[in-house]
Amino acid sequence: MGIYSVELYLQVRLACADGMSQRAAAKRFNVSRDTVRKMLSFSSPPGYRRQSAPQRPKLDGFVAIIDGWLEGDRGVPRKQRHTAKRVFDRLRTEHGFTGGYTIIKDYIREREQRSREMFVPLAHPAGDAQADFGEALVEIGGVEQKAYFFALDLPHSDACYVRAYPAAVAEAWVDGHVHAFAFFGAVPRSIVYDNDRCLVAKILPDGTRKRATLFSAFLSHYVIRDRYARPGKGNEKGNVEGLVGYCRRNFMVPIPKFPTWEAFNLWLEEQCRKRQQDKVRGESETIGERLQRDLAAMQPLPATPFEACDQTSGRVSSQSLVRYKTNDYSVPVAWGHQEVWIRAYVDEVVIGFRSEVIARHPRCYAREEVVFAPLHYLPLIEQKINAFDQAAPLQGWDLPEAFGTLQRLMEGRMHKHGRREYVQVLRLLETFTLADLQAAVEQAIALGAIGFDAVKHLVLCRVERVPPRLDLDIYPFLPRTTVEKTVAKAYLSLLCDRQEAA
């Protein structure tokens, strides 16, 4: 029977209901009597119904072979699994298959549909959370780069927190949690994660996880029960997976442009607050209203937040460098060859000796880079003044123009000794701010007092707010003024000149 419209069904059924015979109805509506009988059995077209499975005689003898290959693919990387084309080629080459490619493709498609996993809808009690990282392009400080954004979702209320980082390292994971807890003012009872290497050092044979050291300390500090999705089963933390996509579509389009990471993260926090005014499909309350139930079920914040940093140790090299994760960071030369401790935060690397912090650097996420602080090397350069021009830590040091002028004047008047005194001037930055020293240098140039002692005196006077008193006898390069004794005949010459003029 062909496919007939619902309208024809209605006309045939009405005609027969009024007493018309099936034979007459078939003749009137130009359909067979079998069709009329089926129209009286169904109120609307039932559609095509296959009575038995399609016969594929050329394929049936090879089904077991195909199933064996596809089952074996479960333990193989996805990109190296059999495609329908590869199955077809192997059957023809290795087993003499004479059928067509289409029946192979249809069979594999139907098999995949039958084996697709089904999921049970889950309920989310208040006070639980899910966490993950996403990626998006951003522009920070005029440089387009990839941002890795931490996302924490409270599935009961759909409230969220998002924070961006230049890298998804372990410290970023922990720092994201610390800021999220401060944002909500409470700590979730449990959090579901994936098996990221920053969190899970190893999955043991019994299915339990060996946590990374930093992550384990973080969980202990906040007393959080951690749960993990099965590898490759993103649906087990589907809420935060959806949140990652939502943030990328709504917060990262168009590409965000901010001067600093901190400015970007403040903006993201504001977007999370605005979202609390929304209503999710199927809910009568806003996210913010449902969030109150989440907060009531969550734990209070501890007295102090967790310090989100990676802690390790290292040794200072002969070039006054300490290595952390392929990058070298400088320390003052006074600590050469010493054992030091290192604390790596998401935005800076702090290096210390015993109880003293000896160096701070912005964290570098490149590889095999050297991060210098010029001040760390000035005491050594003062001793080895011939290395001044080629000293790598001083290359690219952006100082105000007055410093270059002072250097040229010092070297021009005092030669090698002038260069050493210029390094001594730079060392004043160990004590004074650049703004105060710059003002003192400019004042020294204006007075013609070209020397370290003069600059030091001027900067001290500026800081202490007292007028400068320079002893000009110790500056042999200043222009001299000769004041002679008064001679009476000098006045006579002046009088003569006046009379002549009259």
Image (cartoon, helix red, strand yellow):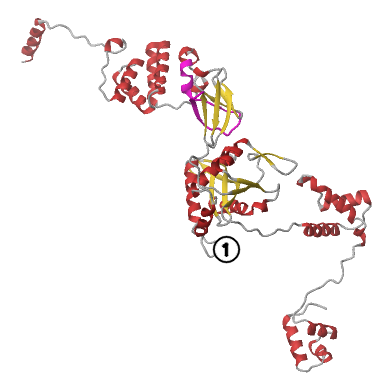
Residue 178 place in picture, x, y as percent: 53, 43
Categorize mark 1 by other alpha carbons within 10 Å: few (<14), some (14-19), many (20+). few
Q: Considering only vertical position in the picture, is 121 above or below 467?
A: below
For the point 80% across and 45% down, the residue is 75
- The answer to if 367 sits in the magenta stretch is yes
Whether residue 393 can be seen here: yes
Q: Considering only vertical position in the picture, is 184 above or below 487?
A: below
* Magenta residues (range): 354-380
Work out which quarter of the rendered image holds the C terminus and state it: top left
Foreground residue, 280 or 53? 280
Whether residue 169 can be seen here: no
Q: Secondary structure at mark 1?
A: loop
- The answer to if 73 sits in the magenta stretch is no
Foreground residue, 181 or 444? 181
Q: Amino acid at mark 1?
A: Arg
Residue 232 place in picture, x, y as percent: 71, 48
Which residue is the extreme one toward the right? 96
**351 lies left or right of 79:** left
Q: Which residue is mark 1?
A: 281
Residue 379 place in picture, x, y as percent: 46, 16
Residue 206 place in picture, x, y as percent: 74, 43
